[in-house]
């Protein structure tokens, strides 16, 4: 598959690859692991929205 991208994030597919991609998006079936990931992500996002989870960020130690 030929994918052409630019520094600014634009992606261009060649004609046949664009048709193949469109068919895959329309008729493709997700893997079980992808479905599980979405389920976990939706639950996690709900927990954040309800305030049931917190994030803590730590700056990395300075390199020597």
Image (cartoon, rainbow, N blue to C red):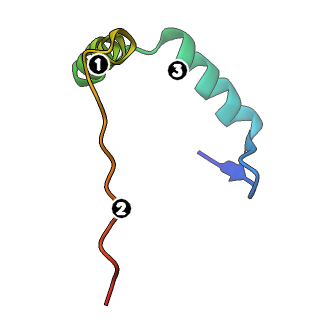
Q: Quadrant of the C terminus?
A: bottom left
Dot 1 lies on which element?
Answer: helix
Q: Quadrant of residue 55?
A: top left
Q: State the residue at coordinates (34%, 79%).
A: 62
Q: Which residue is mark 3?
A: 24
Closer to the camera: disc 1 or disc 2? 2
Q: State the residue at coordinates (33%, 48%).
A: 57
Closer to the camera: disc 2 or disc 3? 2
Q: Quadrant of residue 19?
A: top right
Measured in 3D between alpha carbons, the distance from the residue under mark 3 to the one under mark 1, in whole angstroms, is: 28 Å
Mark 3 or mark 1, earlier in chain:
3
Measured in 3D between alpha carbons, the distance from the residue under mark 2 to the one under mark 3, in whole angstroms, is: 41 Å
Q: Find residue 40 and report its horizontal and vertical position in percent.
A: 25, 18
Q: Find residue 30 and report its horizontal and vertical position in percent.
A: 35, 17
Q: Is residue 34 left or right of residue 13?
A: left
Q: Nearer the viewer, residue 44 or 20?
A: 44
On residue 44, which mark appears?
Answer: 1
Q: Find residue 8 and report its horizontal and vertical position in percent.
A: 76, 52
Q: Which residue is mark 2?
A: 59
Residue 18 drawn above or below residue 47? below
Q: Nearer the viewer, residue 24 or 50?
A: 50
Farthest bottom residue in view: 64
Dot 2 lies on which element?
Answer: loop
Mark 2 or mark 3, earlier in chain:
3
Q: State the residue at coordinates (29%, 18%).
A: 44
On residue 26, which mark appears?
Answer: none
Residue 6 drawn above or below residue 21? below
């Amino acid at each position: 598959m030929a994918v052409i991208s630019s520094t600014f994030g634009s992606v261009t597919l060649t004609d046949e690859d664009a048709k193949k991609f469109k068919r895959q998006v329309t008729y493709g079936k997700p893997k079980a692991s992808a479905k599980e990931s979405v389920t976990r992500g939706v639950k996690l996002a709900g927990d954040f929205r309800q305030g049931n989870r917190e994030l803590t960020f730590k700056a990395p130690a300075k390199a020597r």
